Image: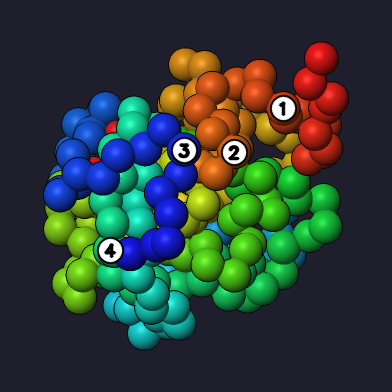
């Protein structure tokens, strides 16, 4: 449990499951997580490989932009930074796009994706993700809203150009920081770099 809950959030007991594009069929035997885009080496990892690479375990809250939060979830996964270092991400990378098996996508600034507690989550509360929760993998960035956590994650792209994901196309924020309440586009944020524009 964290000291504080972000503004505008209320704790609920359990996750509310979302699958805007449906729950896909997952074959863990052929599953690969691809890393591509602004990298020197494109990479692919099997589920077994990812499990062996788990380098983060912590307990953090999860926050959905619709206002519910789940306290004290135990997460285990691979730091996105670990994957980025293996792929040798170029300085030209400014954004990270997450792709899901069902066609869902989300986008985050590269700084947020590479922060120390940003992970590709493989386990929740000591067990592999269940199918509803995004098995085999979902990104988790504790300080960003839950829609950025693309379930059934299949690829991570590093890009120079900003590109809307599923919810960003529908008006949700480019970054989605929970402490800044970046729920919708137009909140103190500009595409060109991460500078804050003066709020007039
Ligand atoms: N593929 C996919 N990932 C998704 C979603 C979705 O509809 N499809 N919903 C997002 C939203 S808005 C939230 S709050 C979380 C919810 O996670 P949960 O379904 O495990 O509760 O998943 C996110 N990831
Ligand atoms: Mo959400």
Residue marked by disc 3: 7
Callout 1 environment at 10 Å: few (<14), some (14 to 19), or many (20+)? some
Q: Residue furthest front?
A: 3
The C terminus, quarter of image? top right
Residue marked by disc 2: 180
Q: Please tell me whether mark 4 or mark 3 is closer to you in this view.
A: 3
Q: Is residue 85 above or below residue 33?
A: below
Callout 4 environment at 10 Å: few (<14), some (14 to 19), or many (20+)? some
Q: Is residue 83 above or below residue 166?
A: below
Q: Nearer the viewer, residue 179 or 120?
A: 179
Which residue: 21% across, 51% down?
A: 133
Give the CA distance from mark 4 to mark 3: 19 Å
Q: Position of residue 57 (x, y in %)?
A: 38, 78
Q: Nearer the viewer, residue 80 or 29?
A: 80
Callout 3 environment at 10 Å: few (<14), some (14 to 19), or many (20+)? few
Q: Which numbered disc, 2 or 4, marks the residue that appears first in the sequence?
A: 4
Is mark 1 in CB contact (under 8 Å) with mark 2?
yes
- Which structural element holds mark 2? loop
- Locate ligand 1 by image quadrant: top left
Q: Is residue 99 above or below residue 53?
A: above
Residue marked by disc 4: 73
């Amino acid at each position: 449990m964290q000291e504080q809950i972000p503004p505008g959030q209320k704790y609920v007991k359990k996750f509310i499951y979302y699958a805007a594009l449906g729950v896909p069929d997952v074959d863990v035997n052929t599953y690969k997580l691809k890393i591509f885009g602004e990298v020197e080496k494109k990479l692919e990892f099997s589920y077994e490989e990812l499990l062996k690479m788990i380098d983060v375990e912590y307990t953090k809250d999860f926050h959905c932009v619709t206002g519910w939060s789940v306290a004290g979830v135990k997460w285990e996964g691979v730091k996105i930074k670990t994957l980025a270092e293996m792929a040798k991400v170029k300085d030209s990378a400014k954004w990270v796009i997450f792709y899901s098996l069902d066609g869902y996508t989300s986008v985050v600034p590269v700084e947020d994706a590479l922060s120390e507690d940003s992970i590709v989550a493989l386990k929740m509360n000591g067990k592999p993700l269940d199918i509803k929760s995004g098995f085999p993998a979902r990104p988790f960035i504790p300080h960003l809203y839950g829609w950025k956590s693309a379930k059934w994650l299949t690829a991570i792209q590093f890009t120079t150009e900003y590109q809307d994901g599923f919810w960003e196309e529908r008006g949700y924020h480019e970054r989605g920081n929970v402490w800044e309440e970046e729920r919708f586009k137009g909140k103190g944020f500009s595409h060109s770099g991460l500078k804050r524009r003066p709020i007039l």
